Amino acid sequence: MSDILDTLVAEARARSAHNQVHDPMSSIKQRLRRAGPTRNFRAALDTNEKPRVIAELKKASPSKGVLRADFRPVALAKALAGAGAAALSILTEEKHFQGSDLALRQVREVVDLPLLRKDFILDEYEVYRSKLLGADAVLLIAALMNETDLRKLIMAGREAEIDTLVEVHDEAEADRAVACGARLIGVNNRNLRTFEVSLDTSRRVASRLPAHVTKVSESGIRSSQDVRQLMQCGYRAFLIGEELMCSPQPGDRLREILS
């Protein structure tokens, strides 16, 4: 892993440990029993017809710095929902992506779309906690955990009744995700180590994803032409962030991509 990725993982583990001291697992599980129903994230993406976009709310990234200085999650969520997003992805990592748990809670109150909590989630505790924050799905990065842990977190998602989007970057990770029972797999076109982006990653990995898996292509999707080409490879769902966040009018840009 790259130095920045090592740092992100170490910080995520420290945050989770801190959260567990102040809000233990026993309390989390107790409150989960009283939690309201989740919105069906996977169902929102399943279609054989038009493309479905998970629009991502992201203020900054470690590789590119601030993407959107005027970052207003509620206004952005409303605009993207109105423009045809099927779901929203909310960054909650604070230090490097300038996200927050509060943003997830605020967005939950103003849109009816299912929400993905995107963070470095590495243990069952954070899966359960994500539902209490208002998430309907969580991102699990296959590269950051072994098969035993990945399987454990997928099962934790089912217990909490939220979806798990398992992110892979190559054929080996895709095979591992399928073996662990992942039903929702995102192929990230951004290399975790170099941060280079290539849609060829999605094209190459597509053949390793069986028909029962909901396939998502992530990162580097910038146009309706990109979407059309990836649909020919079997993708119907697309996670788009930077292209929207760097646009003066993200809602209008999403409409263009979906046109």
Image: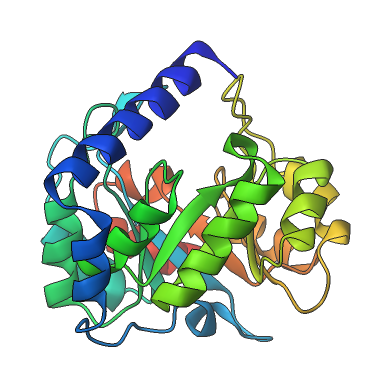
In the current view of this chain or complex, which residue is farthest to the right? 207
x and y percentages locating residue 187 in the rendered image: 66, 51
Residue 159 higher or lower than 191, as above or below: below
x and y percentages locating residue 210 in the rendered image: 83, 70
x and y percentages locating residue 168 in the rendered image: 67, 47
* Numbered marks: total: 0
Of 259 and 127, the residue lying toward us: 127
Residue at 54 percent across and 78 percent down: it is 45
Quarter holding the N terminus? top right
What colouring style does the render use? rainbow
Q: Is there any visible trace of residue 161 in the rendered image?
A: yes
Q: Is residue 49 left or right of residue 238?
A: right
Residue at 49 percent across and 12 percent down: it is 3
Residue 54 higher or lower than 101, as above or below: below
Of 172 and 201, the residue lying toward us: 172
Residue at 37 percent across and 45 percent down: it is 119
Quadrant of the rendered image containing residue 87: bottom left
Q: Is residue 81 left or right of residue 71?
A: right
Q: Is there any visible trace of residue 167 in the rendered image?
A: no
Of 178 and 206, the residue lying toward us: 178
In the current view of this chain or complex, which residue is farthest to the top? 3
Quadrant of the rendered image containing residue 56: bottom left
Residue 22 higher or lower than 236, as above or below: above
Q: Is residue 172 left or right of residue 25?
A: right
x and y percentages locating residue 201 in the rendered image: 75, 42
In the current view of this chain or complex, which residue is farthest to the front? 26
Residue at 52 percent across and 85 percent down: it is 43
